[in-house]
Image: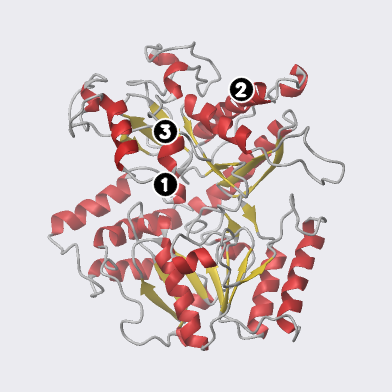
Amino acid sequence: MAVTESAPAVPPAARTQTRTPDGSHSGPHDGTTTEAHDPTVRGAPDREDPDRESPDRSGPERSGAERSGPDQGGGGGGYEGILRRQSLRESAARTYARSLPIVPVRARGLTIEGADGRRYLDCLSGAGTLALGHNHPVVLEAIRKVLESGAPLHVLDLATPQKDAFTSELFATLPGELADNARIQFCGPAGTDAVEAALKLVRTATGRSGLLAFTGAYHGMTSGALDASGGATDVRVTRLPYPQQYRCPFGVGGAPGAQLAARWTENLLDDPKSGVTIPAGMIVEAVQGEGGVIPAPDDWMRRMRHITAERSIPLVVDEVQTGVGRTGAFWAVEHSGVVPDVMVLSKAIGGSLPLAVIVYRSELDAWEPGAHAGTFRGNQLAMAAGTATLAYVRENKLAERAGTLGDRILGQLRGLAAAHPCVGDVRGRGLMIGVELVDPDAAGPDDLVPPAAPALALAVQQECLARGLIVELGGRHSAVVRLLPPLTLTDEQATAVLDRFADALAAAERAHIPQLPAARRATAPRTAPGPTH
């Protein structure tokens, strides 16, 4: 998915058509489009914002040149200068900045405003971090209270009122069987450190070193987390098949494929000649995110719990991206009723600020003091923001809302797929949604499904950005367009997102598959989501 960066590109949104939530189009423009027809243009009514108000401003509307104020590092050039200096100064490991050449300066809810004055609908949400969207009032108020209280902001792992409130609120959301007998470890601020902590914990508790992980998994970028992820090259864990409906490793899909995957796992552990000894733990995602938005079947999850419990293998569930209502339940394991031994939590639990923890059964708490330490385990602002976020999601039943709205969006995307043969599969759970793009004409006689089309997916992402919609790519071949909108997404916003995505898909398809008859490229009729509840 690499993009050549000889010079940062101007966001294509500045030179294309845009569909507004009511379906009307603005014409081709250079940034001077009539604001009434383009909600992404500077100064337009911010209709996509959940709170129906623009981001806070300290003064009157400023010109585009004045909005380039953050560019004070020398060299000028406004936001283009900022992008150019980023490409020159930052490492080659940059990711999101390559495909999203924008400079965010303000944000509220679903909406990001760039330094170029344009507004974008953000369906990336900090890779799932922003459960309530950008700068939600309850989060800002929680942070403000800590700042105004004079409380210390750095306390290592000392007890504080903020930590006590966060832990209490978090435990109130956990599966009861775990919460009643749980311990919590505050880790370094990233989810990958929490994964490392979980692996160290189960190895210490069991005295074993092996690990069971799954194809397509993603658990972070540190050494141990990478070993357990699907892209590992120096394999030090046992890799198990993760069930898929669309690209089933056994070629059967559905319940039979999941049963075969479970049987493979069971046989591997029980076969004295398999070369696999009883491991320290099994780590699994209830919905694979980076792997392509693949929900684990509930029956299969229950089978993994049974297999591990029978053999005294701790079950570690990575809820870094799926947690806090994202999938339609507060925690994704709740769909299957599984109670794991260890839960790995990060992203949304910090209310947009860095925070990561593991929660685990007290019987596993065999660590010595300092066995897993870190200077930044006591992020007071993140704990306050996280407490506010957890409580808001729980009290306002946003998990249930995500499940209901997510089902509608999935249904509409599947309707869209019927008119676009390049859409191979639409899948997801709640507001964690993936659209896999394929090359319908490249399938061989023995292929069960067409091959992935990463170039087409990249084109769709760029066409989405041109229409003021931010999406991300994932999956085995970066051919899955991912939608992770905030849980505060409204019906009107969902319609706007789907309209822009449909336009982007049609445009990318026309450019990449010109031989398709026009009838096959037609966009399916739009159907607005039903009333909110």
Q: Which residue is disc 2 drawn over?
A: 507
From the viewer's perspective, is residue 168 above or below residue 467?
Answer: below
Location of residue 405 (image quadrant): top right
* Residue 170 in picture, x, y percent from top left: 40, 67
| Mark 3: amino acid | Glu
| Mark 2: amino acid | Ala
- Nearer to us in this view, 9 or 338: 9
Whether residue 43 sits left or right of residue 274 in the image: it is left
Location of residue 68 (image quadrant): top left
- Looking at the image, tell me whether mark 3 or mark 2 is earlier in sequence order: 3
Residue at 21 percent across and 51 percent down: it is: 144
As helix, strand or loop, the secondary structure at mark 1 comes to helix
Whether residue 72 sits left or right of residue 133 in the image: it is left
Location of residue 388 (image quadrant): bottom left
User: Which color scheme did the rendering employ for the protein?
Assistant: secondary structure
- Nearer to us in this view, 136 or 202: 202
Task: Check residue 153 in the rendering and tell me which mark sits there, or answer none.
Answer: none
- Looking at the image, tell me whether mark 1 or mark 2 is earlier in sequence order: 1
Instruction: Give the CA distance from mark 3 to mark 1.
Output: 23 Å
Instruction: Give the CA distance from mark 3 to mark 2.
Output: 24 Å
Residue 200 makes an appearance in the image: yes
Report if the CB atoms under discs 1 and 2 are less than 8 Å apart. Answer: no
From the viewer's perspective, is residue 39 above or below residue 226?
Answer: above
Q: Which residue is disc 3 drawn over?
A: 5
Whether residue 4 sits left or right of residue 242 in the image: it is left
Instruction: Classify mark 1: residues with Cα within 10 Å, few (<14), some (14-19) or many (20+).
Output: some
Residue at 31 percent across and 56 percent down: it is: 385
Q: Which residue is disc 1 drawn over?
A: 126
* Residue 181 in picture, x, y percent from top left: 46, 82
Q: Quadrant of the C terminus?
A: top right
Whether residue 73 sits left or right of residue 415 in the image: it is left
As helix, strand or loop, the secondary structure at mark 3 comes to loop
